[in-house]
Amino acid sequence: MPRWLVRILWGLVVALPAGTLLLWWLGSLPEESHPEVGRVVFGNVPDPLVALFYVASAVFLGAFAYFFAVRAKNWARGAAEKRAGQWWRRVRELERGLSQRSVLERADAGLMHAMIYYGFLVLFLGTVTLELDHIAPTGLKFLEGRVYQGYSAILDVAGLVFLGGLAWAAVRRYLIRPWRIRSKSRPEDAVILAVLAVVGVSGFLVEAARIAVDGRPVFETWSFVGYALSGFVPEGSASAIHQGLWLTHVAAFLAMLVIIPTTKLRHMFTAPLNMALSPRERPKGAMREMPNLMEATGVETIGAAKVAEFTWKQLLDTDACTICGRCTSVCPANQTGKPLDPREIILKLGEVAARTGSPAVTPPVGFDAAITVTSDSVFERITAEELWACTACRACDEVCPVDIEILDKILDMRRYLTLMEGDFPPELGNTFISLENSSNPYSMSQQNRADWTAELDFPVKRLGEAGVTAEYLYWVGCAGSFDDRNRKVTVSTARLLHEAGVDFAILGPQELCTGDPARRAGNEYVFQQLALQNVKTLNDLGVTKVITQCPHCFNTLGNEYPSLGGEYRVMHHSEVLMDLVQEGKIKPKGGNGQTVTFHDPCYLGRHNDVFAAPRGVLQAVGDVVEMPRNGTNSFCCGAGGARMWMEEHTGKKVNVERAEEAVATGADVIATGCPFCLVMLDDGVKEIGANVQVKDLAMLLAERSLD
């Protein structure tokens, strides 16, 4: 991990106590100020208590930094990962975290969180401002007169906002109790809320007692909360009450310094840090790179099973987690009764890392004492069933307010299970054999890849034949070549390209599976075997531009082949078709009154941010009706992450859940832009007995433009 970060944290172990003691000394240099409109910083606080405050603060701030430093030592156990450069993106992500914009994407919990955060931040800055005024020379002090009154009013407002946020949090956690919060509530949550509440309430009470000690001067009415409460403080005992409350406030502050780094409240610091470190060179649709397994020697393990086999950033993720459960709430596997809970993956990894650290540190969230961890293998806590339930849809990563990368961890663990343990669902064994022997997951002969061209009334060029060149390679994909339902999509796409005068050609038998099913199933060896051969073919043929109707091919060719030497401009067929419609090269006859709802494929949308192009095509052929979960928030069809080649044995079928949502829109047609989605949704519609057609957008465009 970045050495500078570790050095800074260990440096703070010394710097924070030293700085605190320096402030104590600096505060003793100026003469004590008694402004007409203002306050004495340590008024009514004896010098021994002031000394106790500074010494205790120095010790506890040192402990605060130490607890974070040993956590950083735990992150450093992880493997190397480059997270340098891209500084402007990092600044923007840091600002997004510090401003709470990411949390506020969900207004309910976001507003509550923002009230606590901003209330606390203003109170903290108010304390810093007071200390700066305290150490300033007499002639430079500024907390006097109107400035002091405005300062007092702002802090009282901030205190109310802070306590209001805490009250909201307590009601939400202990009265409303949504499942994703209730399921992870621990005794530490009550301790955190109680300590923060004591800090806020005692602050107001100390203010009230101080005002009473000073005789309730009129200018203190600007401290509207403290002034109102000061009327309840007995005049004769105001001094003793003030000192007692002041000690309570200090004790709560010191307790907070311990609680922050040792409980999940640490995300106050680790979450913005994690967000600043999240930008990376690797596209978000690409898996972590591996060495060339065809040539590499000395590779002892593939994937991740032990703590040290995860990257330092993946370990930092576990300490940045806010335990909010947003990932769980959008996970298609979890929401349909499968054993996977994305939040649990993060917490279990964090628990193993924390309990096997040297020294051991507190886990991300409190755990059951009956659960034992005897080694640094994550498979003591994470089961294979959890990992294989994942559809690799990336909904968890997309919704996380602090940029935790959950999918990478799942896929790295799958790599270990598949290649090191041979522990994968039995159906995948046949898929792997088909990919190795037939170069496609359907076990079909490569010689039949171009059979669909017989349905066309024009010839299709094939790259590799004598004298054949083309501007675009049309990468048909395995489903488009061999699956009956998807061959209709291929024929429609080819006809549209031909009608628009696009110069394209295909590879025919030279086209192999991109390897996506193998890679998402953890079989990096088969993926590289296929991918390297494809890259060689494409490079030898001089291919530079690729059109494909399969988002999985689109993602693999565009995001993962570059690391293997294959640099191409890859376009999804929806992008090409939208451009052709806008340019007038394809002219739909206009809407026929039919309504269409579009299902966003995960590998087109969340993985590659292509949302507008499919809708642009569909708007030319009908009226688009959106499903409740659409765009970035779309719900998976259930086929991603190699789930296309596995059976669902637990819970409700993901494709049925999505089909029900699509049918509920009342649309005449359910449109897709992915061969897997087409099959899954078509099967789902048939299973629920709905009378709705499922078609690819190319089929709909061809019907309105060519037929």
Image (spheres, rainbow, N blue to C red):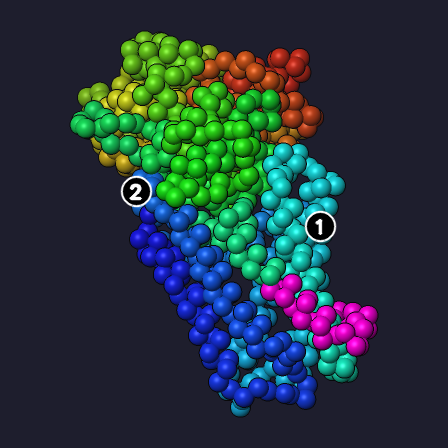
Q: Position of residue 126 (x, y in %)?
A: 59, 70
- The answer to whether residue 47 is left or right of residue 676 is right
Toward which corner of the image does residue 671 lie, by quadrant? Answer: top right
Nearer the observer, 275 or 583: 275
- The answer to whether residue 577 is left or right of residue 367 is left
Query: What is the C-alpha distance between the residues marked 1 and 2?
Result: 41 Å
Q: Magenta segment range?
A: 222-250
Image height of 69 relative to 579, above or below: below
Extreme residue in the bottom direction: 139
Toward which corner of the image does residue 681 lie, by quadrant? Answer: top right
Residue depicted at 56% across the width and 60% down the height: 254
- The answer to whether residue 517 is left or right of residue 260 is left
Image height of 589 relative to 688, above or below: below
Q: Position of residue 515 (x, y in %)?
A: 34, 23
Residue depicted at 44% across the width and 26% down the height: 380
Task: Tell me which numbered mark, 1 or 2, is placed earlier along the sequence.
Answer: 2
| Residue identified by numbered label 2 | 80
Q: Is residue 323 magenta?
A: no
Which mark, residue 168? 1
Answer few, some or many: residues within 10 Å of disc 1's Cα (few below 14, many 20 plus, some between 14 and 19).
some
Q: Position of residue 476 (x, y in %)?
A: 38, 22
Q: Secondary structure at mark 1?
A: helix
Contact (Cβ within 8 Å) of mark 1 with mark 2: no
Image height of 132 relative to 456, above or below: below
Residue depicted at 33% across the width and 47% down the height: 1
Q: Is residue 248 magenta?
A: yes
Residue depicted at 22% across the width and 28% down the height: 299
- The answer to whether residue 294 is left or right of residue 78 is left
Q: Secondary structure at mark 2?
A: loop
Nearer the observer, 241 or 486: 241
- Please name the amino acid that badge 2 sits on: Ala
